Image: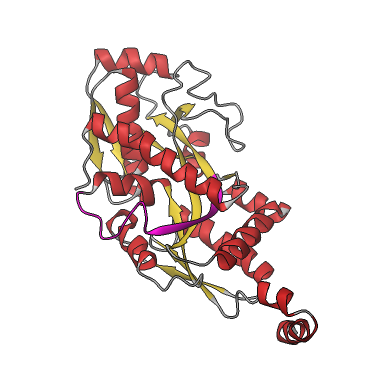
Amino acid sequence: MIKRRAAFALLATPAVAQAQSFPARSIRLVIPFTAGGSNDIVGRILAEAMAARLGQPIVIENRGGAGGLLGNDVVAKAQPDGYTILLAGSGSFVISSLTVPRVPYDVVNGFAAIGGVGAGPNVIAVNPSVPVTNLAELRDYARAHAPITFGTPGAGTTAHALGAMIALTLDFPIDFIHYRGTAPALTDVVAGRVQMITNAAAPFLPFLSSGGLRALAIAGRQRASILPDLSTSVEQGFPEIDSATWYGLLAPAGTPQEPITRLHAAMNAALEDAGVRARMVENGVEIETSPTPGDFAKFLVTERERWGVVVRRANLRAE
């Protein structure tokens, strides 16, 4: 049916048909993490919804490793035709490139922006044995009982950088303990072997409900839909603590404008769908689309500058 309509348009209005020629085949979406995590969930929801609007399948390719750098590299070196795109994230795309001495691609000029998807607000939480209920109390307690142990899903991740941001802002030392993923870090915090953790809200919910974790704040400016009663770091008087796990789409540098425009439009249309938005919110993602690909490109520059300050001040390095 799609091919017949395209052929009819070609005969009737060649200019219109040419504008609608992309995509003519399936698209590859590279997710720079293994299957099953939050990036994978977000990518699959988005791919399904975009495919329905583009009229072509979007095939997921999980390329985990090196904190996202391996998957990023695949896309950076792919043919710039719009048929290979990347699910980029705050940790896997921005922070990883700032904490690794050598990145195998051009971080600044190696990609073309498509658009932003949204962000999962990061929750700052502690084991209930830590006698604090907000950031001011954490500051006072940590200064008196330093260092605070802090579990991360790996060196150079968003959580690692946010922990450094918290330590710099509240002025207390942190002992970082790096794990191979969020799950083992969370397990040790709930068990009381580690005192503190940050992450997107969704994985924390069962433990917050059961009392295995105590949430202190949302690290940002807006409250989370799935934790509406939890105040933000800004509300608590610490606007410098601002971090969310965001997601967006990128293509290789040199991708023509037509595929970029079509992909951006399909993504924004998908994220306006009530069912898609509900699934994203259930997984802790607050939708925030980019009006244009250029807006997302500017956002990436700002994020790199902002996190660069934190990485340099804290001397963060991925292991």
Is 117 part of what is drawn in magenta?
yes
Kindly identify the residue that appears in the image at 52 percent across and 25 percent down.
Answer: 232
Q: What x and y, as percent, mark residue 267?
A: 62, 58
222 to 181, vertically: above or below:
above
Residue 170 figure quarter: top left
- Answer whether residue 111 is magenta in the image: yes
The quarter holding residue 185 reads top left
Say left or right for 179 vs 206. Answer: left
Q: Is residue 30 visible?
A: yes
Q: Which color scheme is applied? A: secondary structure
Residue 192 seen in render: no
Q: Is residue 98 positioned above or below 170 on the image? A: below
Quadrant holding the N terminus: bottom right
Magenta stretch, residue numbers: 101-118
Q: Nearer the viewer, residue 278 or 242?
A: 242
- Residue 78, percent from left and from top: 39, 71
Task: Using the image as rendered, state which of residue 81 and residue 125 is in the foreground.
Answer: 81
Q: Residue at x 73, y 74 (%)?
A: 16
Q: State left or right for residue 45 relative to residue 174.
A: right
- In screen coordinates, is 65 left or right of 124? left
Q: Nearer the viewer, residue 229 or 97?
A: 97
- Where does the image place residue 197, in percent across and percent down from the top left? 36, 35
User: Quick one: 151 or 109, which is closer to the camera?
Assistant: 109
Is residue 271 positioned above or below 219 on the image? below
